[in-house]
Image (tube, rainbow, N blue to C red):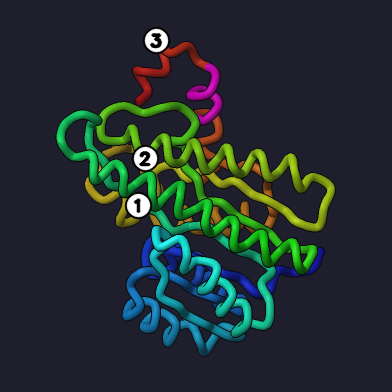
Amino acid sequence: MGRRQKILITGASSGLGEGMARRFAGEGRSLALAARRLDRLETLADELRPAAEQVAVAQLDVTDTDSVPIVFGKLREELGGLDRVIVNAGLGKGAPLGTGKAHANIETIQTNLVGALAQIEAALEIFREQNSGHLVLISSISGIRGLPKAQAAYSASKAGLSALGQGLQAEFANSPIEVSVLLPGYIETDINRGVKTSLMADTDDGVDAMINAIEAEKGWAPIPAWPWTPIAVALKYLPAAISRRLV
């Protein structure tokens, strides 16, 4: 497998998406960047163009599921193909269920799971036609075990995304299509603003760990590996009475 040169990133206008775009641009890759905030995307693209081989941008709201394959198709055309698609667009809204804020939980599921499914469909249609490609799903440590209160819907959305990735890995095993499921822990980004924890990684370290896992095309990787790999194992296997104290 050669270097994945043509990379599409959703949710690229801020946070981990923006960080990944900057790293790949610095390596002279060709980038297709999509997000809801077109003005921020265009500003970012102008910054990246001197280093990147090519930068294409498109406005995309992944909850408008009909638009996803159209946007992916246009970006693919502009880059002359896609070698890697990073399904990164996500939302962290939420409230305890049954407290009158269903809209926030529904929006989170629609963005993180239904929107992700639309992106996966569009990416795999391209990869199947090419008979090659690397699909990267940005899930979360919170998808390993159901979380309480305001994180319940977010946790469920990421568990669903991880399950989609596992199913695709089984389907595409020993094929030219690779599927990676990455599980970030607490990384300093907009989505984690206000979270107080000693486990928070700074943005640069988080992006470094993300890029390393993507380039290695790992099937499953907590990000950063320390301390999240042992935490992931604990969340998965400890009895509920103990794991509840961790969340």
- Percent coordinates x, y for residue 48 in the rendering: 48, 82
> Residue at left 59%, top 62%?
122
Residue shown at the point (51%, 87%) measured from the top left: 49
Query: Contact (CB < 8 A) between labels 2 and 1?
Result: yes
Most prominent secondary structure in the magenta stretch? helix
Q: Earlier in the sequence, mark 2 or mark 1?
A: 1
Question: Which is more N-terminal, label 2 or label 3?
Answer: 2
Left-right relation of 138 to 41: right
Residue 224 visible in the shown view? no
123 vs 25: above or below: above
Image coordinates of residue 127 in percent, x first then y, are: 71, 63
- Camera sees residue 17: yes
Which of these two is toward me, 8 or 185? 8
Image mark for residue 154: 2
Q: Which of 43/167 is in front?
A: 167
* Distance in Å between CA atoms under marks 3 and 2: 22 Å
> As drawn, is 206 to the left or to the right of 81?
left
Q: Is residue 25 magenta?
A: no
Vertical arrangement, residue 146 with respect to residue 8, above or below:
above
The answer to whether the residues at label 3 and label 2 have Cβ atoms under 8 Å apart is no
Instruction: Determine the secondary structure under disc 2.
Output: helix
Q: Residue at x 27, y 46 (%)?
A: 93
Residue highlighted by disc 3: 241
> Residue sitting at 74 percent across and 69 percent down?
3
Spot the residue most to the bottom. Answer: 50
Instruction: Look at the image and give the residue range highlighted in magenta.
Output: 232-237
- Name the residue that disc number 1 marks: 91
Callout 2 crowding tier (Cα within 10 Å): few <14, some 14–19, many ≥20: many
For marks 1 and 3, give the CA distance.
29 Å
